[in-house]
Image (spheres, rainbow, N blue to C red):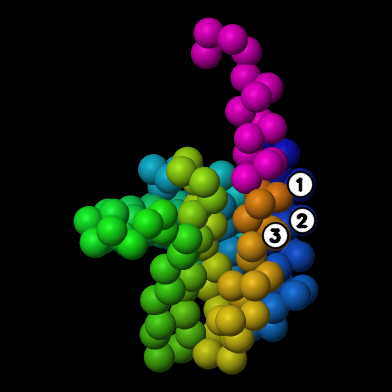
Amino acid sequence: MDHKALAQEMRGLREQVAGITDTAVAAADGLLIAADTADSIDPEGLAALAAAGLGLARRTADATDRGALHRTVTYGSHGCAAFYAVGDTALMVVLGDEGMDVDRLHMATQPALSRIGSILTAQDSKAPEGV
Protein backbone atom coordinates (compact mmCIF):
# COMPACT_ATOMS: atom_id res chain seq x y z
CA MET A 1 0.00 0.00 0.00
CA ASP A 2 1.34 3.42 -0.94
CA HIS A 3 0.62 5.15 2.37
CA LYS A 4 2.87 8.05 1.41
CA ALA A 5 0.71 8.85 -1.64
CA LEU A 6 -2.48 8.59 0.43
CA ALA A 7 -1.03 10.87 3.11
CA GLN A 8 -0.05 13.35 0.40
CA GLU A 9 -3.64 13.41 -0.91
CA MET A 10 -5.03 14.00 2.60
CA ARG A 11 -2.51 16.79 3.25
CA GLY A 12 -3.31 18.30 -0.13
CA LEU A 13 -6.97 18.61 0.82
CA ARG A 14 -6.03 20.40 4.05
CA GLU A 15 -3.98 22.86 2.03
CA GLN A 16 -6.83 23.53 -0.42
CA VAL A 17 -9.72 23.81 2.04
CA ALA A 18 -9.44 25.83 5.22
CA GLY A 19 -11.15 24.27 8.22
CA ILE A 20 -10.38 20.59 7.58
CA THR A 21 -9.38 19.08 10.91
CA ASP A 22 -9.10 15.34 10.21
CA THR A 23 -9.15 12.92 7.27
CA ALA A 24 -9.19 9.16 6.83
CA VAL A 25 -9.42 6.59 4.05
CA ALA A 26 -11.04 3.24 4.77
CA ALA A 27 -12.32 0.16 3.02
CA ALA A 28 -16.08 0.09 2.50
CA ASP A 29 -16.33 -2.41 5.38
CA GLY A 30 -14.78 0.13 7.79
CA LEU A 31 -11.22 -1.22 7.92
CA LEU A 32 -8.88 1.76 8.27
CA ILE A 33 -6.39 2.20 5.42
CA ALA A 34 -4.83 5.59 6.26
CA ALA A 35 -5.57 8.48 8.60
CA ASP A 36 -4.47 12.01 9.36
CA THR A 37 -6.34 12.70 12.59
CA ALA A 38 -5.86 14.51 15.87
CA ASP A 39 -4.95 12.49 18.95
CA SER A 40 -8.49 13.05 20.26
CA ILE A 41 -9.95 11.10 17.31
CA ASP A 42 -9.91 7.29 17.20
CA PRO A 43 -9.14 6.68 13.50
CA GLU A 44 -10.33 3.05 13.55
CA GLY A 45 -13.62 4.08 15.17
CA LEU A 46 -13.98 6.95 12.70
CA ALA A 47 -13.47 4.57 9.78
CA ALA A 48 -16.07 2.14 11.12
CA LEU A 49 -18.63 4.90 11.73
CA ALA A 50 -18.01 6.40 8.31
CA ALA A 51 -18.53 3.02 6.65
CA ALA A 52 -21.78 2.49 8.54
CA GLY A 53 -23.06 5.97 7.68
CA LEU A 54 -22.06 5.73 4.04
CA GLY A 55 -23.60 2.25 3.84
CA LEU A 56 -26.95 3.54 5.11
CA ALA A 57 -26.83 6.47 2.71
CA ARG A 58 -26.01 4.09 -0.19
CA ARG A 59 -28.97 1.88 0.66
CA THR A 60 -31.24 4.91 0.94
CA ALA A 61 -30.12 6.25 -2.46
CA ASP A 62 -30.65 2.80 -3.98
CA ALA A 63 -34.07 2.25 -2.37
CA THR A 64 -35.28 5.64 -3.56
CA ASP A 65 -33.84 5.38 -7.10
CA ARG A 66 -31.43 8.29 -6.57
CA GLY A 67 -28.57 6.57 -8.41
CA ALA A 68 -25.04 5.92 -7.20
CA LEU A 69 -24.18 7.68 -3.95
CA HIS A 70 -21.36 10.21 -4.15
CA ARG A 71 -21.29 11.70 -0.65
CA THR A 72 -23.13 12.39 2.55
CA VAL A 73 -22.55 15.20 5.03
CA THR A 74 -23.47 15.37 8.71
CA TYR A 75 -23.62 18.80 10.32
CA GLY A 76 -23.08 19.37 14.03
CA SER A 77 -22.88 22.46 16.19
CA HIS A 78 -19.06 22.45 16.01
CA GLY A 79 -18.53 21.48 12.36
CA CYS A 80 -19.30 18.70 9.95
CA ALA A 81 -18.28 15.25 8.77
CA ALA A 82 -18.31 14.50 5.04
CA PHE A 83 -18.24 10.91 3.81
CA TYR A 84 -17.25 10.24 0.20
CA ALA A 85 -17.48 7.00 -1.77
CA VAL A 86 -14.23 5.96 -3.44
CA GLY A 87 -15.69 3.58 -5.97
CA ASP A 88 -17.55 0.64 -4.46
CA THR A 89 -14.77 -0.59 -2.23
CA ALA A 90 -13.49 2.37 -0.22
CA LEU A 91 -14.41 5.70 1.35
CA MET A 92 -12.88 8.90 2.54
CA VAL A 93 -14.07 10.84 5.57
CA VAL A 94 -13.26 14.51 6.12
CA LEU A 95 -13.96 16.30 9.39
CA GLY A 96 -14.11 20.07 9.44
CA ASP A 97 -14.70 22.89 11.87
CA GLU A 98 -17.67 25.26 11.68
CA GLY A 99 -15.74 27.57 9.31
CA MET A 100 -15.08 24.97 6.61
CA ASP A 101 -16.51 25.84 3.18
CA VAL A 102 -18.34 22.61 2.33
CA ASP A 103 -18.96 23.60 -1.30
CA ARG A 104 -15.23 24.18 -1.76
CA LEU A 105 -14.57 20.86 -0.05
CA HIS A 106 -16.85 19.03 -2.49
CA MET A 107 -15.05 20.61 -5.46
CA ALA A 108 -11.58 19.88 -4.05
CA THR A 109 -12.38 16.26 -3.22
CA GLN A 110 -13.39 15.21 -6.73
CA PRO A 111 -9.87 15.05 -8.20
CA ALA A 112 -8.48 13.74 -4.88
CA LEU A 113 -11.02 10.90 -4.84
CA SER A 114 -10.04 9.94 -8.36
CA ARG A 115 -6.35 9.84 -7.40
CA ILE A 116 -7.08 7.91 -4.18
CA GLY A 117 -9.09 5.40 -6.19
CA SER A 118 -6.13 5.00 -8.56
CA ILE A 119 -3.74 4.51 -5.64
CA LEU A 120 -5.98 1.82 -4.14
CA THR A 121 -6.56 0.15 -7.53
CA ALA A 122 -2.83 0.09 -8.25
CA GLN A 123 -2.32 -1.72 -4.95
CA ASP A 124 -5.03 -4.27 -5.82
CA SER A 125 -3.46 -4.94 -9.23
CA LYS A 126 -0.14 -5.82 -7.55
CA ALA A 127 -1.69 -8.69 -5.58
CA PRO A 128 -0.36 -12.08 -6.66
CA GLU A 129 -2.70 -14.30 -8.66
CA GLY A 130 -4.74 -16.74 -6.65
CA VAL A 131 -4.95 -14.42 -3.64
Q: Check residue 111 in the rendering and tell me which mark sits there, or answer none.
A: 3
Packing grade of label 1 (10 A; few <14, some 14-19, many >=20) is few
Q: Which residue is mark 1?
A: 4
Q: Check residue 8 in the rendering and tell me which mark sits there, or answer none.
A: 2
Front: mark 1 or 3:
3
* Residue 126 magenta: yes
Upstream in the sequence, badge 3 or badge 2?
Answer: 2
Upstream in the sequence, badge 1 or badge 3?
Answer: 1
Furthest residue toward top: 130
Which range is magenta?
117-131
* Residue 32 magenta: no
At a point 28% along the width and 58% down the height, the residue shown is 65
Q: Is residue 61 left or right of residue 35?
A: left
Whether residues under marks 2 and 1 lie with C-beta atoms below 8 angstroms apart, the answer is yes
Q: Disc 2 marks which amino acid?
A: Gln
Q: Secondary structure at mark 1?
A: helix
- Distance Cα–Cα, label 2 vs label 1: 6 Å
At a point 59% along the width and 91% down the height, the residue shown is 99
* Residue 129, x across and y down, in percent: 59, 10
Relative depth, front residue between 125 and 68: 68
- Distance Cα–Cα, label 1 vs label 3: 17 Å
* Residue 37, x across and y down, in percent: 59, 64
Q: Is residue 99 visible?
A: yes
Relative depth, front residue between 35 and 112: 112
